[in-house]
Every structure is written in structure tokens, then in C-alpha cells.
Image (tube, rainbow, N blue to C red):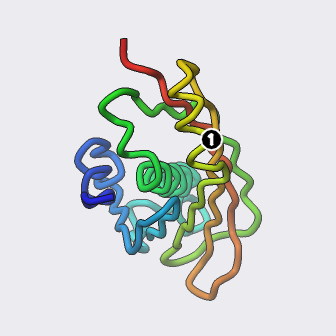
Amino acid sequence: MSFDVGAFLLQTVPFAGTIGVEFDKVQDGYAACRLPDRADLHNHVQGPHAGALFTLAESASGAAMLSALGDQLSRAVPLATTAVIHYRKLAKGEVTAEARLLADRDEVVARLDAGERPEFEVGVEIKNAEGTLVSEMTVSWTLRPNR
């Protein structure tokens, strides 16, 4: 893809920027981003609030999806339809999210070409600075064809 997906996402979804999501790598159905450790994002146990972790993971999933399917934006709107998150361990400090498109890009586009509204998933892992898995999320996306 020829545009900066991370910058595009932060521009179109300003809330991600409000909490400080930073994109490190976005390419070919993959995205890595991080959330700095900020006291104003902490919960009652001094780790990132569950909502901040959710936003980080959802942002990573959107960037991974856009890096693979952003060339379809002229004819379809991407929409998250469901998200399931599992909080595995207490997160502390800066956290990173890695997202991967779990569908075959060509199959998604073929379904869109056939006039369907394709649905597909992006998997996300959130880890702390030591590399320990703290949360996992699966986001289901659809491409709603423009009318």
C-alpha cells in the first residue's frame, strides 16, 4: 500500500491518538503499535485501563486490515462488527499490540467483487515490555459496499 496507514488511522480515528497509540510497523496484513505508560490511562491497579488496551488492540486490527485491504476504500467501508478480548495477565508499563489479518486477502476481495459483504477476522496479541502476553483480541470486520 502506498500511503501511511498508521497516520491515516490516527487521522480518521482521533481517539486512538488521544490515548497515545503509536504505530511502529504496518504492512501486508500486519500491524505493530504501542501504548506508552501514562498515569492518566491507568486503572485502580496502576496498569493500563481495560478500555485503553481495547483501543490499542482495535487500532492495531484496523491498521492490519487497512494494510491489506485499504485499496478497496473507494468502493467499500470497513466496519468492525464484533470484538472479543481476553485479559490474561495484569499489564504494567508500556504495552505493544501485534495484529495479523487471519483471512486470505484475495478471497475477501473476490467476495466483494461478487457483490457480497465479506466478513473476516484480525487477531491481536498485546504484550508488556518483557514480552509477556497480557491480552488477546479477535476483531471481526466487514467491508460494506458503497451504494
Residue 112 to residue 127: above or below: above
Vertical relation: 112 (above or below) 67: above
Counting from the top left corner in percent of width and height, residue 79 is at 48, 31
Q: Is residue 52 visible?
A: no
| Placement of the N terminus among the 4 image quadrants | bottom left
- At which x and y percent is residue 75? 35, 27
Q: Residue at image x 57%, y 46%?
A: 106
The residue tagged with tag 1: helix, strand or loop? helix
Q: Residue furthest bottom?
A: 130
- Residue highlighted by disc 1: 107
* Quadrant of the rendered image containing residue 111: top right
Furthest-top residue in this view: 147
Q: Could you tell me which residue is drawn at 38 percent across and 37 percent down?
A: 72
Q: Where does residue 89 sit, x and y in percent of width and height?
A: 74, 69
Q: Which residue occupies 56% across, 84% down?
A: 129
Classify residue 91 as left or right of residue 58: right
